[in-house]
Image (cartoon, grey):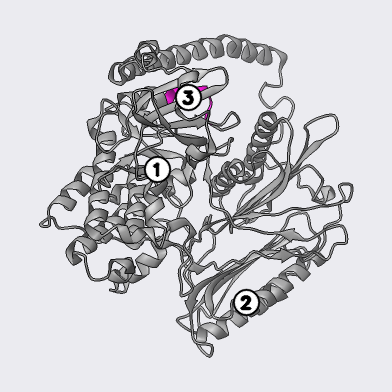
Amino acid sequence: MHSFNPFSLPFVFLSMLIFLNLTTTHVAAQNYLYHFCANTSFAQNSFYSSNINSLLSSLSSNATGNTEFYNTTAGQTTSSNPVYGLFLCRGDVGAEVCRKCVANATQELADKCSKEKIAVIWYDECMLRYSNESIFSTVAVRPIIYLLNSQNITEQDRFNRLLNTTMTEMAREASNFPIGVKKFGVKEVKFSDFQNLYNLVQCTPDLSSTDCNSCLQAAINRLPMCCSGKQGGRVLFPSCNVRYELYQFYNESTAPAPAPGLAPSPPGSVAGSKGKDKISTTTIVAIVVPIAGSVVLFILGYCFLIRRKKYNAVKGEIDANDMTTVESLQFDLATIEAATNKFSDDNKLGEGGFGVVYKGILPNGQEIAVKRLSRNSGQGGEQFKNEVVLVAKLQHKNLTRLLGFCLEGEEKILVYEFVPNKSLDYFLFDPRKQEELDWSTRYKIIGGIARGIQYLHEDSRLRIIHRDLKASNVLLDVDMNPKISDFGMARIFGVDQTQGNTSRVVGTYGYMSPEYAMRGEISVKLDVYSFGVLILEVISGKKNSSFYESNGAEDLVTYGWIRWRDGRPLELLDQSLGDSYSRDEVLRCIQIGFLCVQEDPADRPTMASILLTLNSGSVTLSSPQQPGFFLHSKTDMPIKDMKSNQSTTKSMPWSINEASITELDPR
């Protein structure tokens, strides 16, 4: 696991519409993008203030010659308040552009972050950051900035495959350079007869090859989440960045030479100098390699079959036999249309990433909820089958019950029991509705969600990871009992399987655990992390991913942790509850919430232990440490028009969005 930068900031979606001259290769200087300042203030006349000024001056004065990257420390030997800083110029810009960009960046941070200990700023041509803790040779992947061109691309699937393949290859090549050498690459590849795809990757040179590649891969994995189907996009981390466009946005003449180790071997490097030796070596290789390869393939195949057999035995062989059972639940489309008045807007209950949910009434008077998947949604036939087969097997009072499905033509429809009180977020985040959730109801909801997740993890026929647990996916019945819904993203494990990996990260920002969001690691502790965030939302009545607080926190986990750490945990409590709550229960839930969002999955409790703690006041809880994805900076980010000094660039409207995401197809 990499050590992370001492601050981590929220996921920010920034939409940018750019009109550029596609034939130019000139890069305008000092094109400001965005900045963050961590709200850890210090006295203006302190040693730290003096050290920051000294650091910024040093960074600016060292942006000369061919220096693309520079790091330094101010005050390390003269005070107990050192400041660590660095700048990185884009690998294709000239020395003068780099110098001017760094000069502007230092001035901008001096003006905009004059009271904060931690800051980072991005320009098109450079990045500059500083911190009160060392940031050298360390991977930092937060804050994350997404920039995208709002124009759509044709043939999106083929484009996404080409982009991923090209970027992955570039990341491997750029990261192969040794520490201290420019880790930068650009590449042009043909997409169609009329369009070329231009790509750029870059790391700070102080990273090892492994860390650079890891950082770039994390950025590449996020391109589909923000920019799928768009003509241009980029992901900016403090330690690395990636970008693609359909126009040449970089200076091709500065493209680096191939990384060492990737160059072809010199002629004759394998064979000996004598013809006889060369023939002998070639013959041996020709004989040994196929035999060795066959043996390896045989062993791998045998292991795969054994594992597959064991998994299927536990898994219950979810295949045609299961579908035969499920098909007995099939509705015809005419029945569904009649029940929903042909999907009338008057019957609409809500709309999610995969489609619209309608209320319906069957001929026998039974009320149903009809989930009609959109034809261009990310949930295709396999995901549809996954949800049908999976949910049909689940029987628990805290899970929504599948009544049937419809699969006719292009229609994919799921029929669920009707839950009259809509979803938890409908009440929880509405200032008027949240008053209907007294403390006893909230405590019951927390316990019910925990029981539902424990059933998925431990008590169902299979071990199931939900992967998208959040308030909008928790429905409330007539008695306000919670029912977990939306299993389209669920992952099935064998009973003896504890963890796995995926290259398709799905879920919702703000609820993803660090190891899953960064490395695709899947375990039951992924849901535990999401449950911890959900607990804090239920307690506070505030939404984690869109929470902005003017006095030092940009998301709910940060806000709550600061108060827990400072001995003021009850300030997290929803004010609409007044004094009608159990202090012990509230404190217990807050502590459970922070234990669930620990960075190391091993430090998070199991759902069984959580339920034991909720049901017994005598259980002693461990003390939580700083949460994973703990956020330190203020991000009060108004929508604004950013104007460039390029005559060919029009105003760029920036906006902030929350989104549920998948790898290629937006949820």
Residue 43 in view here = yes
- What is the crowding at mark 1: few (fewer than 14 residues within 10 Å), some, or many (at least 20)? some
Q: Amino acid at mark 3?
A: Ala
Q: Do tag 3 and tag 1 residues touch (Cβ < 8 Å)?
A: no
Q: What's the residue at 45%, 20% (across, down)? A: 335
Query: Earlier along the polypeptide chain: callout 3 or callout 1?
Result: 3
Q: Position of residue 26 (x, y in %)?
A: 86, 55
Question: Closest to the observer: 169 or 522?
Answer: 522
Q: Position of residue 190 (x, y in %)?
A: 79, 32
Q: Position of residue 314 (x, y in %)?
A: 28, 20
Q: Do tag 3 and tag 2 residues touch (Cβ < 8 Å)?
A: no
- Principal SS element in the magenta part? helix
Question: Closest to the observer: 572 or 294?
Answer: 572
Residue matched to label 1: 473
Q: Quadrant of residue 289?
A: top right
**Looking at the picture, does residue 200 appear above or below residue 342?**
below
Give the Cα separation between the discs numbered 2 and 1.
Answer: 39 Å
Q: Nearer the viewer, mark 3 or mark 2?
A: 3
Part of the protein shown in magenta: 379-386
Residue matched to label 3: 338
- What is the crowding at mark 2: few (fewer than 14 residues within 10 Å), some, or many (at least 20)? few
Task: Say whether residue 214 is magenta.
Answer: no
